[in-house]
Image (spheres, helix red, strand yellow):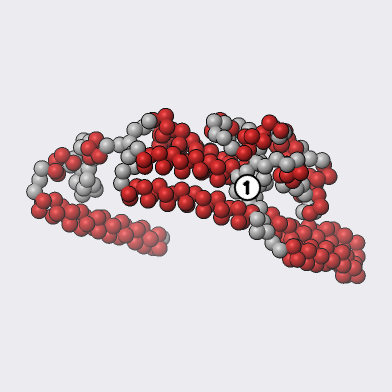
């Protein structure tokens, strides 16, 4: 039972890792952060993997580009930017279908939840509804990210902005030459750099899921999620009786440091009165802090 539970938790992490690679147009499945989690699943990406180039070769092709492409991307030249969907187009021409890995992983995770409902692990309809809602929220989050990725700025706006920007940059030297003489050269370079940089911002924010400095750090998010899942699964679910009866439990802190067992045996009226007095105690403490702040301010004012 515990191993099944751990395997299902791994699918949650696998879903996030698969979404990360899907948003980066990485269709392979043999990544170090993904393959150990889904290698036992029957997916389209796994079937097509034998004919694909490896994930390391794919990443090598993305990271090792010519100097012309690298400098062109830094300068914001669209024709120098590499097409991240090139591997997808090549696979389609070869007749290979990689499917939608995040949806396939979610299908396996939903099957596990259905298994838990049938074997009465999730008896309460309330918990069943919570699990179903969580699955739908994960799918909706993935769908929202894909909508952001597949809804770029309209082509007409891109063309218009590019034409206007370059036209202004090309005409600018003739406007500055009469007044600035030779100083028009560095002035034009600085102005062109600023204007082209502003125009490049629009293209930069169209895809926030890449590997650039300005993109979202999806690797850090997945690593943090993995750490959180490992922490949650490292210990058994806490039992209420264990931490309620702990000697260090002070239910009426900061009014009283007495333990839970000390207050449990007292009459209800005394507990109610203590709860009221705790409010008065906190109000008086806040008032003292405010008076202290005023005194400090007044002291500095006199100085």
Looking at the image, which is closer to me, 55 or 171?
A: 55
User: Is residue 132 shown left or right of residue 254?
Assistant: right
- The residue beneath circle 1 is 23
User: Is residue 125 shown left or right of residue 270?
Assistant: right
Instruction: Name the spot of residue 122 as percent of width and height, x first.
Output: 34, 42
Instruction: Name the spot of residue 285 as percent of width and height, x first.
Output: 26, 55
| Residue at 38 percent of width and 50 percent of height | 130
Q: Quadrant of residue 90?
A: top right
Q: Quadrant of the N terminus?
A: top left
| Residue at 62 percent of width and 43 percent of height | 99
Looking at the image, which is closer to me, 81 or 14?
A: 14
Looking at the image, which is closer to me, 267 or 178?
A: 267
> For mark 1, does the 10 Å Cα neighbourhood hold few (<14), some (14 to 19), or many (20 or more) residues?
many
Q: Quadrant of residue 174?
A: bottom right
Does residue 183 show up?
A: no
| Residue at 47 percent of width and 51 percent of height | 136
Does residue 134 show up?
A: yes
User: Is residue 111 shown left or right of residue 149?
Assistant: left
Instruction: Name the spot of residue 139 as percent of width and height, x first.
Output: 51, 50
User: Is residue 293 shown left or right of residue 192?
Assistant: left
| Residue at 83 percent of width and 63 percent of height | 166
Q: Quadrant of residue 27?
A: top right
Instruction: Name the spot of residue 95 as percent of width and height, x first.
Output: 73, 42
Q: Secondary structure at mark 1?
A: helix
| Total numbered labels | 1
Q: Quadrant of the C terminus?
A: bottom left
């Amino acid at each position: 039972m515990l191993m099944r539970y751990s395997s299902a938790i791994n699918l949650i992490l696998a879903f996030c890792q698969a979404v990360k690679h899907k948003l980066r147009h990485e269709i392979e499945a043999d990544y170090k952060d993904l393959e150990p989690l889904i290698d036992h699943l029957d997916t389209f990406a796994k079937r097509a993997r034998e004919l694909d180039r490896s994930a390391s070769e794919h990443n090598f092709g993305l990271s090792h580009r010519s100097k012309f492409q690298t400098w062109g991307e830094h300068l914001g030249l669209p024709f120098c930017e590499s097409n991240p969907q090139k591997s997808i187009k090549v696979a389609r021409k070869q007749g290979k279908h990689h499917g939608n890995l995040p949806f396939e992983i979610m299908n396996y995770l939903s099957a596990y939840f259905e298994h838990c409902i049938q074997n009465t692990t999730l008896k309460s309809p309330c918990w069943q509804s919570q699990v179903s809602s969580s699955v739908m929220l994960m799918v909706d989050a993935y769908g929202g990210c894909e909508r952001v990725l597949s809804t770029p700025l309209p082509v007409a706006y891109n063309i218009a902005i590019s034409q206007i920007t370059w036209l202004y940059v090309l005409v600018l030297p003739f406007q500055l030459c009469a007044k600035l003489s030779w100083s028009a050269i560095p002035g034009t370079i600085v102005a062109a750099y600023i204007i082209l940089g502003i125009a490049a911002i629009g293209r930069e924010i169209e895809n926030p899921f890449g590997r650039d400095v300005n993109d979202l750090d999806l690797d850090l998010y997945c690593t943090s999620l993995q750490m959180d899942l490992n922490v949650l699964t490292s210990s058994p679910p806490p039992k209420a009786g264990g931490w309620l009866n702990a000697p260090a439990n002070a239910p009426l802190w900061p009014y009283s440091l007495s333990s839970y067992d000390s207050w449990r045996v007292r009459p209800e009226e005394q507990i109610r009165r203590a709860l009221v007095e705790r409010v008065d105690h906190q109000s008086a403490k806040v008032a003292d802090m405010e008076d202290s702040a005023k005194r400090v301010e007044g002291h500095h004012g006199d100085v």
